[in-house]
Amino acid sequence: MNVVVSSFLNFIQFEKQYSPHTYSAYKTDIEQFEDFLIDFCAFPQAQDATFNEIRAWVVHLDEQGIEARSINRKVATLKAFFKFLLKQGTITHNPTKRLKPLKVPQIAPNFIEEDKMLKLLDGYPFQDTFADRRAQAILELLYGTGIRLAELITLKHQDIDHYNATIRITGKGNKQRILPIMRSLLGVIEAYQKAKTELLGDFKPQDSFIVTNAGKEAYPLLVYKTVRAYLSWTTTQEKRSPHTLRHTFATHLLNKGADINAIKDLLGHTSLKATQVYSHNTLDRLREVFEQAHPKA
């Protein structure tokens, strides 16, 4: 990896403090772009690319059947990279300036139906073991707050305010937000902390909240496997990921009449447009209410 790319990756890792998942994605995107340059353009360094090479890469990805959403994410990586180079004075012109994102078909977010979600959280026979208490805490936190997988993994014990029933979340770009949590969720958190102490000993406020059986910070696959396994108890749908619970949180709130701007803040979205994707699901609910209530329906 060349020095310029390494400098950019250090910038997003240490100055921007992007999550390990985001850092890994950026690194992979740039490496894939440089591989393309070597194979098709006869030069290896990303910083030397022009608009034509970048556009050719986008076409190449599209011809390989890569989804438009994934291509746009890769393009966003290059935009951030060249914006960094421009600011550093390494280049004098940003070759991605004219590059427009591909049109992405609107796909309704996948979510778990309310009765199935409540069946799991209220009906699953969680045992008083560390594994079960951890799984319960993961499920309740993801569904009860709508936080992202990376936000859950970086959550510390000191971020939980038991007295005020809130948690402090560190989101994308190291932005923080305070979220309310239900008293019932606090009970789940306390049961998990008790099981954690019994297995691993006393924890410090700055320690990671969700940890492995050995007391190390949880890794994404552990959370993903936990969510998928326990959701299998209540649903057979294919998509059963941590992000599915984030979608479920937002959809259920909208279906209950919550203000979309409030949901935007809860989710940590910077734009209302990102939140409005959930309104597609609520239209079915609104239509159902309309047909049941309106005299002419």
Image: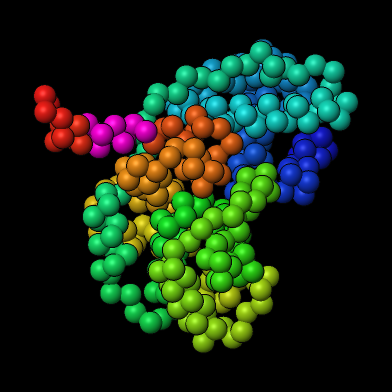
In this rendering, is residue 152 above or below 7?
Answer: below
Left/right of residue 26 with respect to residue 251 in the rendered view:
right
Q: Is residue 220 visible?
A: no
Q: Nearer the viewer, residue 179 or 234?
A: 179
Q: Nearer the viewer, residue 121 or 40?
A: 121
Q: Is residue 205 left or right of residue 106?
A: right
Q: Residue at x 56, y 71 (%)?
A: 163
Counting from the top left corner in percent of width and height, residue 266 is at 51, 47
Quarter placement of the C terminus: top left
- Is residue 138 at least partly visible in the picture? yes
Towards the viewer: 151 or 83: 151
Which corner quadrant holds the N terminus?
top right
Vertical placement of 259 versus 68: above or below?
below
Secondary structure predominantly adopted by residues drawn in magenta: helix
**Can you give x and y, in whole percent of width and height, for residue 165 in the image?**
52, 66
Q: Which residues are magenta?
A: 279-287
